Image: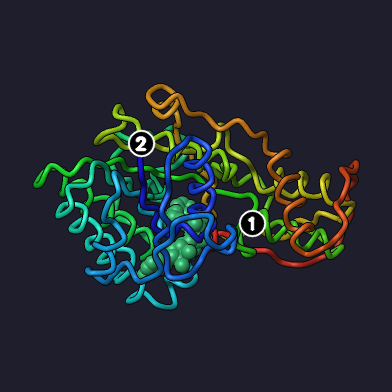
Amino acid sequence: MKVLVTGGAGFIGSHVVDRLQARGIEPRIFDLVPSPHHREGDVDTVLGDLCDRETALAALAGCDAIVHLAALADVDQVTKDPELADRVNVRGTHVLLEAARELEIGRFVYASTIWVYGDAAGPEAVDEDSPLGLPKHFYTATKIAGEMYTFAYTELYGLEHTILRFGIPYGPRSRPTAVVAAFTAKALAGQPLTIAGDGTQSRRFVYVEDLADGVAASLVPAAANRVYNLVGRENTSVRSIARTVRDVVGDVPIVHIEGRAGDLKGGNVSGERAARELGWQPTTPFAEGVQRYVDWVTDEAGMPRVATVSSTDGSAAAVLRQESAEL
Ligand SMILES: NC(=O)c1ccc[n+]([C@@H]2O[C@H](COP(=O)([O-])OP(=O)(O)OC[C@H]3O[C@@H](n4cnc5c(N)ncnc54)[C@H](O)[C@@H]3O)[C@@H](O)[C@H]2O)c1
């Protein structure tokens, strides 16, 4: 089986490529840039812009399925350039849907986000059948648009799809602005970790290699025309992230500053359907995932690996607001 992975050079996509190979599935990367995470020649790669119809058709030719991950995924970038976000995330998705229809591709896997649940993600559990409200962020709007286009192509043209709503990924190859990465960078620099409010606001973090395995698992026949949340098993609070990073990296102070009004407390997104129908559940405990991320960062930077240490509280002041970078 041959699978086109758009965005295969990126954070999540590069891990999806690895997990597909591990399952004996042949990936082909389709990205603007070569993967910095694979040796040249190791993975079949098409370089180009997915918004270009001819390039997209050429990339998809000979594939059995497509896993569509490429996007403007950094919300700060989306805020700065909504036009580009619309071009890549919405119209680019449409170009690929059309190419998949034309080439009669067997499955279109679309990468979405649990942020589509928005404010519905209160204390009540939400699952794939929960209604979606109107999005507050343009990024979320583009991701919902991609879901809707994908769904409509199944209804209209019979193109088989699977929609995956990812929790908040962390782990090796992560963007430096994501919260685990940012706390790690501060801790490695010996700086305090600062939490706005009491730190009980939480998110469904998911270790990226587990997530990538869930993506690969979603190619099974049973996942045809289904939506799945691929999330961690439990919500992880900001306080718990800070403590874990401190325990792994070293004894830096954790400081609480005043919280922001209207901070989302974090929702309870169910991953039960993926467990039941795909047999997929994340297996990496949070502390282990953080340790692997820290090992990767220190290896990349040529720094010595840090051993796990015990923790104590301290005090200092700095501000870390990561909400927007995590969408
Ligand atoms: N990282 C997260 O926190 C997160 C959470 C939920 C869902 N997602 C979704 O997962 C997917 C992957 O996210 P990521 O974090 O790996 O992003 P990333 O930015 O690391 O990777 C995206 C890749 O897409 C490529 N790309 C962008 N525009 C392109 C174009 N026009 N043509 C071809 N390739 C193009 C980029 O070069 C990059 O390699 C996205 O669809 C994103 O919306 C991400």
Q: Secondary structure at mark 1?
A: helix
Give neighbour class at mark 2: few <14, some 14-19, many 20+ (Cα, 10 Å).
many
Q: Are marks 2 and 1 in contact (CB under 8 Å)?
A: no
Q: Can the viewer see residue 327 in this picture? A: no
Disc number at residue 59?
Answer: none
Q: Nearer the viewer, residue 315 or 91?
A: 91
Q: Quadrant of residue 53?
A: bottom left
Instruction: Give how far apart the Cα atoms at labels 2 and 1 are.
Output: 30 Å
Residue 226, placed above or below residue 109: above
Residue to which mark 1 is pinned? 179
Name the residue located 34 percent from the left edge and 35 percent from the top edge. 128
- The residue mark sitting in front, 2 or 1, is 2
Q: In the picture, which quadrant includes the N terminus?
A: top left
Residue to which mark 2 is pinned? 219
In the image: residue 253, left or right of residue 91: right
Protein image colouring = rainbow
Q: Secondary structure at mark 2?
A: loop
Q: Position of residue 135 (x, y in %)?
A: 33, 57
Name the residue located 55 percent from the left edge and 36 percent from the top edge. 232
Which amino acid, mark 1?
Answer: Val
Q: Nearer the viewer, residue 248 or 131?
A: 248
Give neighbour class at mark 1: few <14, some 14-19, many 20+ (Cα, 10 Å).
many
Which amino acid, mark 2?
Answer: Leu
Q: Position of residue 187 (x, y in %)?
A: 81, 58
Q: Can the viewer see residue 325 in this picture? A: yes
Name the residue located 56 percent from the left edge and 59 percent from the top edge. 323
Q: Position of residue 94 (x, y in %)?
A: 22, 61
Q: Nearer the viewer, residue 240 or 165?
A: 165
Q: Quadrant of residue 191?
A: bottom right
Q: Position of residue 247 (x, y in %)?
A: 83, 44
Split into quadrants, the picture shows ligand 1 in the one at bottom left
Lower position in the chain sequence, tag 2 or tag 1: 1
